[in-house]
């Protein structure tokens, strides 16, 4: 934390405090926006529920920061059975004073040949670590795959298993972080690591996203971190220089090993892309899909027919990039 | 304007009206955000004024949607003489009820060998065309180039000249658009077209951005367009179907030729990238630049010395891509 420009008497902490001021306003703005748009999203949900294939068509036009994570085999699931998707800011929905940046993404599916679940919901909590950095943390969400249909090749199951083990260990040992450092990895943790390392260049399934964990920060740790940040801000604002001990502490903690057992390291970025791009702009993407449909008016009827009895969807994975620009979409009768 | 899903009884206009509801909220949010952040931006301006090379360092880290427009020769100007930049939402600054999406971008320069101007300000008005689409429109801003130093190779001067001619013609003929269609292009318009067509693959200078015009929509035309949209929305909301005549009218108007004489067609996108990314995140980009500096700690002192007496900066243009990731930045003494 050296001064970037000592001759100018401006420190990194001065800049960071300015950024925190902006961040406070941004948080307030997100809160207001959520309140103002809530009735509109409800109205939209009713209107688009009447449009067949709305969400599959939106996903077809998803921007690159979403599209890049959708393999052709994922695309087949989404196009054939994604009924709807919804995003909520669950920490403020019930009138409580939570963080408006915490988001829940819920996907609703029709009967399909891949998994039993009708609803998959992934929650992301906006939390602060001891070093003051904020990030989205989550918990693995299991999927009940049908036999031989696991698109994550067992990775999601394993992440869930490891997470459950760590939770029960933490309850036994008190502090999970300290315990982990002194213990060897469990056989499941090792197996998971091997699976992650064996992942090919083609990338993992979109459904691995449900296994994203992020940093291991509890609600209580986050609350304490925010308290500390606020206290130090107040001290700096009143001219006192807070001790720098906190920084050193945080650096020790940094060696946390969680991230190396992450099956979808960009899970937070994908969540934000869905909540901040796909969700608010869904109608625009749908309209784009309609226009693209009108331009390249190719008949995919035959491919549709195969959709439900396709057996070896693994083959699709060899087709390279997750380009869903012109997938075999069911053409709606005009 | 056919119904996208006739069986579902949802029309494109229903979707468009929903989008307009969201747009109203978004406009209100931008207005509130502008009010809440104004004192913070003023505070920030005071703090960063004390940091030498703040803005050149920010530009050094500019994201691709800005960086792609900066040629090495532009970079030399920005790095050596950009003192500061500021963004204002000028239609709401003076307490009036204008559009918060209209933006003014002001750049302040130190004495330099390229142009006489100390301040260059480009304004973008958020206006609606007759077909209801909104866009940012602007007017060419002239730059007083020093002899032999015009980075736009005469294009900016020509755009300004053509624009002045069109303005005075419009005053004579009443309606500039009708007049233009019956008239031949002037010699200056032809010369400008030739210059645009002769532009090489390397792209044009960042400073051509000051020549961006966008659609030719007057304040009055925009006001009338908004009035019409609101009237039709109200009719649809009350169950009446408005006539579709307006759409046909708008399509006729579409053949406008302005855009073909645009020397910086993406000018509006660059403006938004500056106002919505570079400006709010300036401290983050600056911090990134400091970190990059610390990692690749190469001494560019010698190159600095040449900055002010460099004669043949045209050579720089042959260096290829506009990559300013590691330009010859003045190292500040720690």
Image: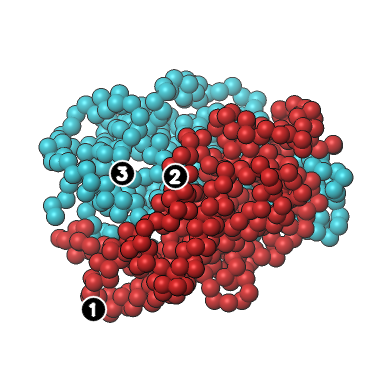
Chain colours: A red, B cyan
Q: Which mark is residue A301?
A: none
What x and y, as percent, mark residue A137? 48, 61
Q: Nearer the viewer, residue B188 or A274?
A: A274
Which residue, given by chain and number where applicable, does mark 1 sit on?
Answer: A240
**Chain ID of residue with mark 2:** A
Against B246, residue B165 (above or below) is above
Label 2: element kind = helix
- State the residue in front, B205 or B57: B57
Report in which chain the residue with disc 3 lies. Answer: B
Q: Secondary structure at mark 1?
A: loop
Which residue is disc 2 drawn over? A194
Looking at the image, is mark 1 or mark 2 earlier in the sequence? 2
- Quick one: quadrant of the N terminus of chain A? bottom left
Please indicate, yes or no, whether residue B303 appears anywhere in the rendered image: yes
Find disc 3 in the rendering and name its residue.
B60
Name the mark nearer the viewer: 1 or 2: 2
Mark 2 against mark 3, which lies toward the viewer? 2
Single out the residue that lies furthest toward the front: A187
Q: Is residue B117 visible?
A: no
Q: Residues within 10 Å of mark 2 (few under 14, many from 20)?
A: few
Q: Position of residue B74 (x, y in %)?
A: 31, 36
Q: Is residue A235 above or below residue B308?
A: below
Real-space Cα separation, disc 1 to disc 3, in angstroms? 34 Å
Q: At 34% from the left edge and 51% from the top edge, which residue is drawn? A: B285
Q: Is B285 left or right of A158, judged from the image as shown?
A: left
Q: Quadrant of residue B24?
A: bottom right
The residue shown at (28%, 49%) is B289
Alpha carbon separation for disc pair 2 and 3: 40 Å
Q: Secondary structure at mark 3?
A: helix
Between the residue at mark 1 and the residue at mark 2, the CA separation in whole angstroms equals 50 Å
């Amino acid at each position: 934390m050296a001064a970037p420009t000592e001759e100018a008497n401006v420190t990194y902490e001065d800049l960071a405090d300015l950024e925190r001021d902006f961040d406070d306003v941004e948080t307030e703005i997100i809160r207001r926006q959520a309140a103002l748009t809530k009735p509109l999203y409800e109205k939209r949900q009713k209107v688009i529920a009447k449009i067949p294939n709305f969400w599959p068509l939106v996903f077809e036009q998803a921007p690159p920061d979403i599209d890049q994570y959708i393999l052709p085999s994922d695309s087949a699931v989404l196009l054939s059975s994604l009924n709807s998707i919804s995003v909520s800011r669950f920490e403020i929905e019930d009138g409580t004073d939570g963080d408006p940046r915490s988001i829940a993404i819920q996907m609703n599916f029709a009967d399909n040949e891949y998994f039993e679940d009708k609803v998959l919901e992934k929650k992301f909590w906006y939390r602060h670590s001891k070093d003051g950095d904020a990030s989205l943390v989550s918990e693995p969400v299991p999927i009940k795959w049908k036999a031989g249909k696991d698109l994550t090749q067992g990775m999601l199951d394993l992440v869930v298993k490891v997470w459950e083990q760590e939770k029960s260990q933490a309850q036994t040992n008190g502090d999970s972080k300290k315990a982990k450092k002194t213990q060897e990895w469990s056989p499941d943790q090792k197996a998971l690591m091997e699976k992650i390392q064996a992942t090919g260049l083609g990338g993992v399934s979109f459904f691995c996203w449900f296994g994203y964990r992020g940093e291991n920060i509890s609600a209580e740790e986050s609350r304490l971190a925010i308290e500390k940040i606020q206290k130090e801000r107040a001290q700096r604002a009143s001219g006192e220089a807070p001790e720098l001990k906190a920084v050193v502490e945080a650096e020790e903690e940094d060696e946390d090993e969680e991230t190396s057992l992450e099956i979808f390291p960009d899970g937070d970025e994908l969540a934000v892309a869905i909540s901040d791009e796909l969700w608010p702009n869904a109608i625009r993407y749908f309209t784009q899909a309609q226009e693209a449909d009108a331009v390249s008016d190719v008949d995919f009827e035959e491919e549709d027919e195969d959709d439900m009895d396709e057996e070896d969807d693994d083959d699709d994975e060899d087709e390279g990039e997750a380009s869903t620009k012109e997938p075999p979409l069911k053409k709606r009768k005009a």
